[in-house]
Amino acid sequence: NTDLKAPGGVPGVMEDPSGLPAGAAAAAEALVGLGAQPKAAGRDTFDVAGRWQLRAVGAVARQDPDLAGALRVSELFEVRQLPVAEGAALNAAVRVVTIWRQAPLKGNEEVQ
């Protein structure tokens, strides 16, 4: 998340109409398979399939060395089994790498 406001006034960048960050969606699918529907459970925290909790713990963004004009974002999520007790052990970690790049809108006016 970021302090900048996305469309609709929600914090962070909205990659999905529901406001679900793309990194959290990818991490959830890595955890339980396609069609995972994580639900926000607090700031930077998501519940997945009623069994797992994802917590975003860090992200790094930099220019992609292989693609001119592209941005590579690497996000790290901690995974804990639900219900999460105070001081619960970490079960796993998921790293998601997303490459963002601009695409011309010419010919794609319906996305504007």
Image: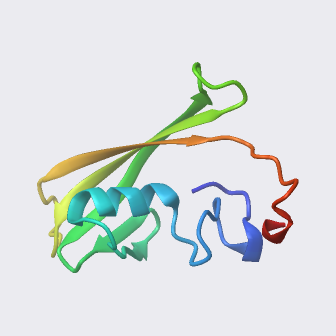
Above or below — where is 70 with respect to 58? above
Q: Give coordinates of residue 59: x percent, y percent.
A: 48, 41
Which part of the image, by quadrant, shows the C terminus?
bottom right
Residue occupying image coordinates x 17% and y 70%: 84
Front-lying residue, 5 or 49: 49
Q: Give coordinates of residue 98: x percent, y percent.
A: 50, 43
Q: Along the horizontal axis of the image, is 65 left or right of 29?
A: right
Q: Give coordinates of residue 5: x percent, y percent.
A: 74, 64
Q: Residue 110's quadrant in the figure?
A: bottom right
Above or below — where is 68 with respect to 111? above
Front-lying residue, 14 or 67: 67
Above or below — where is 91 with respect to 28? above
Residue occupying image coordinates x 42% and y 75%: 40
Residue placed furthest toward the front: 107
Residue occupying image coordinates x 73% and y 57%: 4
Q: Give coordinates of residue 102: x percent, y percent.
A: 74, 43
Q: Along the horizontal axis of the image, is 73 left or right of 87?
A: right
Query: How many numbered marks appear?
Result: 0
- Tell me, yes or no, if residue 26 can be seen here: yes
Q: Along the horizontal axis of the image, is 98 left or right of 34?
A: right
Q: Residue 2's quadrant in the figure?
A: bottom right
Which part of the image, by quadrant, shows the N terminus?
bottom right
- Tell me, yes or no, if residue 90 can be seen here: no
Residue occupying image coordinates x 44% and y 62%: 44
